[in-house]
Amino acid sequence: MMIRVTLPAHLRKLAHVDGEVKLDVEGPVTQRSVIDALEARYPMLQGTIRDHVTQKRRAFVRFFACGEDLSHEPPYSPLPDAVATGAEPFMIVGAIAGG
Amino acid sequence: MSGVRVLVGTRKGAFVLASDGKRDRWDISGPHFAGWEIYHLKGSPADPNRLYTSQSSGWFGQIIQRSDDGGKTWHQPGTPPGEPTTTPEGMPKAESNKFVYDTSPETGKPLTTHQWYDGTPHPWEFKRVWHLEPSLTDPNTVYAGVEDAALFRSIDGGQTWQELAGLRGHGSGSSWAPGAGGMCLHTIILDPSNPNRIFIAISSAGAFRTDDGGKTWQPINRGLHSLYIPNPTAEVGHCVHRIAMHRSHPDVLFMQKHWDVMRSDDAGESWHEISGNLPTDFGFAIDVHAHEPETIYVVPIKSDSEHFPPDGKLRVYRSRTGGNEWEPLTNGLPQNDCYVNVLRDAMAVDSLDKCGVYFGTTGGQVYASADAGDSWAPIVRDLPAVVSVEVQTLP
């Protein structure tokens, strides 16, 4: 399944990509499987979205898709069909926190 | 012709300032890593083209960057652009920002809490790298002082990091508490005469020394007196802001503490105050002249609640007598309406003759003196707030 992911500018720069990232995700499309695939493709992003050890989302990172905030959804919950089919991107966003 | 490279870390990126030995014209490159907090960048004494940078963000955490060409290009160690991102065995290479505390009983102790500001137990959490100290002899070995306070070491050019767990586990770790800037290990001094001896300092725990390459550690705070802790002469708990050493006198240490400028002549076994005639003995930065081991520099700051120079006058103070007798250096520095701070890692010296002295301010200026402090001029005036300044003297 080809999944579209958008990254904040700082992470695009670290990963040396422009625009959306397209990832081939095998099996159920969940937060966990999408980020696993993202980190496998771009290992320089390890630790920047979720903790290396606990795998918890970093506090100032949020996940949006289809107009919904999915930040607090369980990591193994299926993402919306529109994300799974590639119609809508899975959006990784830096929280608005000044600076 | 020899030259200097000034490595500047700021709240919004890194800058590299380069000049020839005259030090009157500067080429400025940057911002590198724009938008990120750069707590520190430093070059390897064994290979001046090898630079390490701590890049961090409240959003995306810690990144380590490395340059092998003097700052022209950078990469995260282990993931050079254009190269495979996994090892032949399929393992991801990106471990360069993985700082995981060692809790194994074999190498440390399963230390899980330190003290919070109010004295209650608080979990140990990695936040960022404050200071990177490359080995004096091996470009691939580099130490990292981190928040929450711990010392890490990489022996593969920054690709992987291991904690020297004997420091946190030596016995007092559970009583360490943060200073206002966080509980940071901010100073790492490698003894040039003894490869097994390392000095470190933590806010707000104090100074520590190892004599066996980092396996075991002892606090070295005898003589320090701090009114902000229950026992002012306690073995640990002192907010040491910075320590400096001249490489020819490795047993002589100079310390800028939260309050008080201190000196040790016995590798930290005991300290005595050398604040002398300073207008205030609060401050952050301290450094030693490259060729005169008894000439030291501080930037007095008004107080712990008013982090700016007294009377709005930015003055570096120099002692040529190893302390106690200080002279203000003002030529070229603003002498009215100046309310910037100079942070602990934001002063450095070059080893040209005459010795160059450099410091950066929270107002974004980097000042340089090419005559050991007698006169000053800004290299740049309008950078983001400066966090750190390091200098490389190039052949």
Image (spheres, coloured by chain):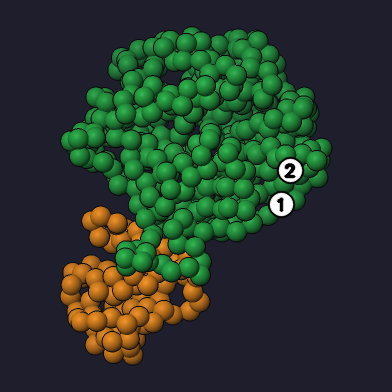
Chain colours: A orange, B green
Q: Dot 1, how many residues are within 10 Å of its Cα: few (below 14), some (14-19), or many (20+)?
A: some
- Residue A16, position as x, y percentages in the image: 50, 70
Q: Are marks 2 and 1 in contact (CB under 8 Å)?
A: yes
- The dot on residue B379 is 2
| Residue drawn at the location 32% of the way across and 67% of the way down | B90
Q: Earlier in the sequence, mark 2 or mark 1?
A: 1
* Above or below for B143 versus B207: below
Residue B212 image offset from top left, x and y in percent: 36, 24
What residue is rendered at 26% in x and 41% in y? B102
Quadrant in which the N terminus of chain B appears: top right
Choose between B19 and B335: the one closer to the eye: B19
* B141 relative to B123 in the view: left or right: right
For this rendering, which residue is in front, B37 or B330? B37
Q: Residue at x 43, y 24 (%)?
A: B197
Q: Secondary structure at mark 2?
A: strand
Residue B28 numbered tag: 1
Q: Is residue B385 above or below residue B305?
A: below
Question: The disc labelled 1 sits on which kind of residue?
Answer: Ile
Kind of residue sitting beneath label 2: Ile
Q: Which quadrant of the view contains residue B289?
A: top right
Q: Residue at x 18, y 72 (%)?
A: A76
Where disc 1 sits, the SS reads strand
Chain under numbered label 2: B
The answer to which image quadrant residue B116 occupies is top left
> How many angstroms separate mark 2 from mark 1 (CA)?
9 Å
